Image (cartoon, grey):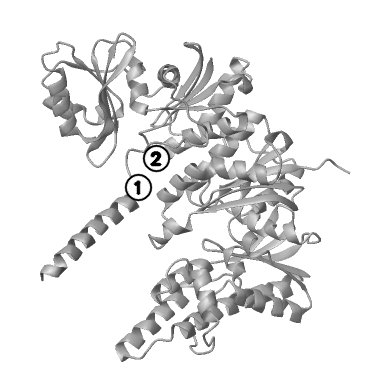
Amino acid sequence: MKILAIDSSGMPASAAIAEDDRILAEYTVCFKKTHSQTLLPMIDAISGMIDLDPRTLDAVAVAGGPGSFTGLRIGSATAKGIGLALNKPLVHVPTLEAMACNFFGSSRILCPMMDARRSQVFAGIYSFSKDRLEVLMDQRPVPVEELAEELNKLAAGTGRGLVLLGDGAEVYRTFLEENLTVDYDFAPPNLNAQRASSVAVRAFQLIREGRLQTAEEHCPDYLRVSQAERVRAEKGTAARTADSAAPGR
Amino acid sequence: MDKDVRILAIESSCDETAAAVVVNGREVLSNIISSQIDIHTLYGGVVPEIASRKHIERINQVIREALAAAAVTLDDIDAVGVTYGPGLVGALLVGVAEAKAIAWARQLPLIGVHHIEGHISANYIEHKNLEPPFGCLVVSGGHTHLVRVRDYGEYEILGRTCDDAAGEAFDKVARAIGLGYPGGPKIDRVSREGDPLAIDFPRGKVRGSEYDFSFSGLKSAVLNYLNECRMKGTAVRTADVAASFQKAVVDVLVEHSMHAVEEYGFTEFAIAGGVASNSALRLAMEEACTKKGIAFYRPSPVLCTDNAAMIGAAAYYEYRKGIRSDYSLNAVPNLQLGER
């Protein structure tokens, strides 16, 4: 089974082609150019390097979120376009599960996190039992204070220690250093960021669990509503509260 | 006779997700438009992030419908055309990434298309004899351009708006007189009941540039008028305000257009863009062209609104010239007409 894997959820743009748990090619660029300019030329370049006929792909895997809204859509639209053109299924890989696979098989507790602004991070907490990914906290937007508490609670007394990775760990490095009461390490640069080979590794597991989707049904999972919807919902709640208070006056 | 060229075209620059299959730039095999207007109406205008989210939800289905309605498969397609600007960047990016991926996967030529060139090219679809050179007025919610079409793909902008686009002015005035969004069709409808001469709103002029437009002064004049009525306690006749405002917009558009017809000697004049559906504009422009003895063209309403058939028409003429985009094609939100 051969798959193309894509991650454009954060600062790096990354593409990989993997066959039966072997990475045939991988290309990652972390630069100021937009993913729109880099992603498809990268896919084209690695395909050329390994003489890939795109029609021989069995599926396209994409880091489906969380991440930058625009970045996610570039990755998803690319995957959806290839899926549509070649009639191939897609694999929606949760971004933070893919990042946890940078430390595949580690005995430590893994916490990938992405800066989500508004004093939050998108984070998930994972561990491996042999080669099975266990989800200790499913990926979600969380205030960094709450995440630190959760990590202290989960790792305390286990003797397992933590690995913190992702751009969120860089942004909140000082806070985490001051507030974590358990053993931790920050990931080294080669394992710290999104990379498509990790998306591929997680995708193979999900494929084995039968979690494929059609190109048509795939959509990014933003883990957050748009600002306009949030503001509207808040106003709606305020209006409803006012309404329900009205009869008492 | 050359082989027919079938283009799959994709458009996602604002709040319509659209795909079409067009043969030789003139024959539309399918033209699928998925409008998001209902959701944006809740917010009184297009919300960019919501538009982008809706595009990615709908795009594959819209493309598949376009292929199915045209009774073709991607095997029958010769090139992929896509709008890459101007427009909302997040919205454009969905169509651009999708189009690039399809082109890559099927090894098809890719052609990035300017949205306004698409609107102008909409006129080729129903008017088989129309060929450059001609004059064209492009009026929509985001654009107001008076254009000299020198040749296929060769444009000279004679005038443009200095502030609000004509369609934007319709939206803002419609909101002020309580008609809501989208303003264009609503003002058009209500105006039929009103007196266009009831209120003398100003015709905006731009000092020193005879072809440029300005609509923000007109919009302020309408707001001031409404305010005055409120202060004086006089009743506002909504239909009269709408009709008088609409006439002020139409007068300026027609006057500038006819001025260009005289100066450049156009024998054919076309209108395009969402506001080209406005019945008062269509009528006034037709009368003015008839008076000048020149041919007047306008697309059917479905081709005035944002659609992909027009992108397929524009892409075809680029294709014939050998113009191709590469895989680094990016969305350019403020792309200028004639720029590459």
Q: Foreground residue, A89 or B274?
A: A89
Residue at the image point whose x is 28% and y is 54% from the top: A233
What residue type is disc 2 on? Phe
Q: Foreground residue, A82 or B112?
A: A82
Q: Foreground residue, B162 or A157?
A: A157
Which residue is label 1 attached to?
A226
Q: Mark 2 lies on which chain?
A: A
Could you say which quadrant of the image residue B129 lies in? Answer: bottom right
Give percent across and percent down for residue B109: 69, 35
Quadrant location of the N terminus of chain B in the rendered image = top right
Could you say which quadrant of the image residue A238 lies in? Answer: bottom left
CA distance for labels 2 and 1: 9 Å
What residue type is disc 1 on? Ser
Figure check: B6 above or below A19: below
Which residue is label 2 attached to?
A69
Q: Do labels 2 and 1 share a chain?
A: yes
Give percent across and percent down for residue A50: 59, 14
Residue at the image point whose x is 52% and y is 82% from the top: B243
